Structures are given as structure tokens and as C-alpha cells.
């Protein structure tokens, strides 16, 4: 999920009553709920390093206790700075003394809860994470919530903004001011989010079942018994694997990718009328060639093949009129290179939020020289140097 949703989730968890148990609970949980995304700092070493380590070790159960210790340690240092500043003040108002006890053990447990919320939110979308790494490198993805869900964001924002608004109204009518506001709003928001997840998870399972029941005519390989004038035989086959991807607004609309072995088929599922509308074109998988094998063995290729459950590779050979123009027009060797493109069909769906111009998100390209040596590795528009 995006950062604001993570931080609002941590703040709402604290406002369910945990902020009454220990000082700095809201600050600790809001920071901890976003802290695992500190792995984005790897992108400073280039797009390949960022892709390799995104949702890596900081998104694992092994690292959570360490991260909670780091967060609580930072809060402790912050507390010492504030305490020292207050002790040097010329006069101290007794009413400003904290009414909530400092309970560092509880604060550590609250940080763990917020860190777990980050893993749960990231699991709910289709990018996934590896929570059991390094013991189990498998990626897990619930794929029932879009990376930015407007309804979930609205529920969290209301839980955060409505209590101050009502407090302002109460102050105008002379009502007694409450020290801890928003417990009911935060609890109701989290309960509603749980209901939204339940609905989306149920509809996700229905979309997968509906798409798994489809069948398509798959051409079979030619054999010696086929005459030249006879078309190769076909048979109707069901998909080997189906992935359903959520729509950001409609829980009954799903974008599915079906793997038929030799090609991928994209389709749209409408669960209100149990209909499946396939896309007009299919994405045929290329044959294994030396260039393809060399690209898969590259650092980018290994990372991409490990992450994507349905990697789609295309090969653009020298002289191919459909290949993109070289970046360096004055480089005479640019036209003699082979370009291998890595894409994930889950992010090739027709959804404006997933597109930046004509590019497909999470697209990687590898440029190979005449001897299949790696000349350039690119993620999106960034080149790995």
C-alpha cells in the first residue's frame, strides 16, 4: 500500500485505546506502520538494487523485532531530548507533566503490532511480499485490494479527521473537552476495513473460479502426420493458472490473467452478472533462445523471474522494425543489439492508474551485445549504472 494509508493505519490502531496505555503510542505506531518501506533507500544504488530489495528483508517476520527495537530506541532518544529541554526551562507548569506513564515494554509491543499491520496491508495487494525470507523465499500476495484503495483511505482519513472536527463543535457549545478523542471512530474504521477486506477476498475467490472455468482453442504443435494443406490441430484447454487483480473502485470488477501454457490471456470479470470478457489480443510466450536465456541469467532477469509469477518476455532482434529507437542516436552499435523486455501481465491491464503514458509499470529491459554480453539494464526509465 502507499505510505499515507500505512501511517493512518498505525495512528488508528493507537487510537483504539493503546494511546491510553503508554506515552508516545500514537507516534510510535504511526512511524512503525510505515517503517518497513525504508528499503526504498536501496534505490539510491540504482533501479535494479531498488527492485531487488523492495519488500525484502525489512518486510519479514525475522526483521520485525529488530525494527521495533530501532523505532522504540529512536523514540527514547526523542524523549530524552524533550526531557532535557523541559528540565532547563525557567518555570515548569505542573499541568504540562505527562499524565500517561512511560512504558517502554508496552511501546515495543505496540511497535510490533504496527509493523505487522504493514505486512498485512502489503500482502493484500498483488505485488506481494516474502514474510518468511530467508527461510522461505516464496512470494505471497492476496491480490484482493488495489495498491491504493479509495474506500479504505476514506475510512482511515475520517477516523483521523472527524474527532478534531467534533471537538471543535463541542468547544463552541461549551462541552467538556476529552483528553483522548477518536476511540470510537478508530475502532469503527478498522472494523469497516475488515468487512471491506472480507468482501473483496470473497469476490476475488469467485473471480478466480469463474476465470478458471473458461476454455480457449489452443493450437497444437504440428506433427509429421499433418499434411501441408491441413491446419494444425487445436483443442480446447483450460488455463493452467489464473491471477485476479482488483479494481480500485468496484469490488465486483476484476482484471484476470490466465496462463494457457503457450500464451497469456487478459480478461475482465464482472461478478454482478458472472460475465468474462477476454481482451482482443493474446500475449504469446517466446521460444527459448540463447538471447532469452542470457537475459534470464542476468541480475535483473534473476530478480524478475523470482518475483513475477507470470513473467512475460519479448525479444527484439536487430533489424526488427517494431523495436524502440536507441537512446544514443550517435552510437553505431545500438542497432546491432538485442533487447529483451520483462513485463508482468498483472500490470498490463487497461487501467489508467497503472499507466504512465504508454509504459507498463515494473517493466525491465536488458540490452545484449552481439556476443550476448549485458550492455544495459533498465527498470522503467532508469538505467542501472
Image (spheres, rainbow, N blue to C red):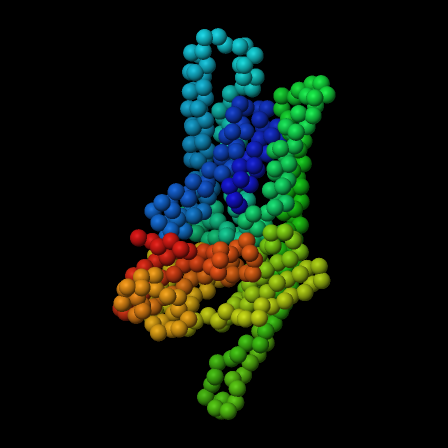
Q: Residue at x 67, y 41 (%)?
A: 192
Q: Please state if 4 lies on the left or on the right of 317 as rendered.
A: right
Where residue 85 appears, as percent x and y from the top left, is 43, 16
Q: Residue at x 49, y 26 (%)?
A: 105
Can you say whether 13 is above or below 128 in the image? above
Can you say whether 67 is above or below 278 in the image? above
Quadrant in the rendering for residue 333: bottom left
Q: How many marks?
A: 0
Can you say whether 326 is above or below 9 in the image? below
Quadrant in the rendering for residue 156: top right
Where residue 33 appears, as percent x and y from the top left, is 51, 37
Res. 191 visible in picture = yes
Q: Please state if 309 lies on the left or on the right of 251 as rendered.
A: left
Residue farthest along the top direction in this orientation: 91
Can you say whether 177 is above or below 381 in the image? above
Q: Residue at x 43, y 48 (%)?
A: 54
Where residue 98 appears, as percent x and y from the top left, is 54, 17
| The one of 114 and 249 positioned closer to us in this rendering | 249
| The one of 142 and 327 positioned closer to us in this rendering | 327
Q: Residue at x 51, y 41 (%)?
A: 3
Res. 62 visible in picture = no
Where residue 58 appears, as percent x and y from the top left, is 43, 42
Amino acid at each position: 500500500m502507499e505510505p499515507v494509508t500505512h501511517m493512518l493505519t498505525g495512528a488508528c490502531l493507537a487510537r483504539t485505546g493503546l494511546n491510553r496505555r503508554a506515552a508516545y503510542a500514537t507516534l510510535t505506531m504511526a512511524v512503525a506502520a510505515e517503517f518497513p518501506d525504508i528499503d526504498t533507500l536501496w534505490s539510491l544504488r540504482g533501479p535494479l538494487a531498488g527492485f531487488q530489495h523492495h519488500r525484502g528483508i525489512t518486510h519479514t517476520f525475522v526483521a520485525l523485532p529488530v525494527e521495533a527495537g530501532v523505532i522504540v530506541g529512536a523514540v527514547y532518544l526523542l524523549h530524552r531530548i524533550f526531557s532535557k529541554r523541559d528540565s532547563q526551562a525557567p518555570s515548569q507548569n505542573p499541568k504540562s507533566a505527562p499524565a500517561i506513564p512511560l512504558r517502554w515494554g508496552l511501546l515495543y509491543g505496540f511497535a510490533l503490532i504496527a509493523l505487522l499491520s504493514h505486512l498485512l496491508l502489503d500482502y493484500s495487494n498483488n505485488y506481494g511480499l516474502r514474510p518468511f525470507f530467508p527461510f522461505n523465499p516464496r512470494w505471497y500476495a492476496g491480490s484482493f485490494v488495489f495498491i491504493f484503495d479509495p474506500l479504505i483511505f476514506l475510512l482511515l482519513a475520517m477516523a483521523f479527521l472527524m474527532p478534531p472536527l467534533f471537538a471543535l463543535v463541542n468547544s463552541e457549545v461549551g462541552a467538556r473537552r476529552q483528553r483522548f478523542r477518536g476511540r470510537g471512530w478508530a475502532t469503527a474504521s478498522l472494523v469497516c476495513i475488515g468487512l471491506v477486506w472480507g468482501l473483496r477476498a470473497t469476490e476475488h475467490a469467485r473471480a478466480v473460479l469463474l476465470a478458471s472455468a473458461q476454455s480457449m482453442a489452443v493450437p497444437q504443435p504440428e506433427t509429421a502426420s499433418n499434411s501441408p494443406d491441413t491446419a494444425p490441430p487445436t483443442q480446447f484447454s483450460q488455463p493452467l493458472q489464473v491471477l485476479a487483480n482488483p479494481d480500485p473502485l468496484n469490488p465486483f470488477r476484476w482484471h484476470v490473467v490466465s496462463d494457457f501454457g503457450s500464451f497469456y490471456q487478459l480478461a475482465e470479470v464482472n461478478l454482478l452478472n458472472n460475465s468474462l470478457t477476454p481482451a482482443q489480443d493474446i500475449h504469446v510466450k517466446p521460444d527459448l533462445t540463447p538471447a532469452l536465456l542470457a537475459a534470464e541469467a542476468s541480475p535483473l532477469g534473476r530478480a524478475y523471474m523470482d518475483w513475477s509469477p507470470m513473467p512475460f518476455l519479448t525479444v527484439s532482434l536487430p533489424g526488427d522494425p517494431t523495436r524502440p529507437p536507441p537512446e544514443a542516436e550517435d552510437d553505431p552499435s545500438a542497432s546491432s543489439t538485442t533487447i529483451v523486455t520483462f513485463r508482468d501481465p498483472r500490470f498490463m491491464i487497461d487501467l489508467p492508474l497503472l499507466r504512465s503514458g504508454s509504459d507498463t509499470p515494473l517493466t525491465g529491459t536488458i540490452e545484449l551485445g552481439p556476443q550476448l554480453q549485458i550492455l544495459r539494464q533498465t527498470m522503467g526509465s532508469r538505467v542501472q549504472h
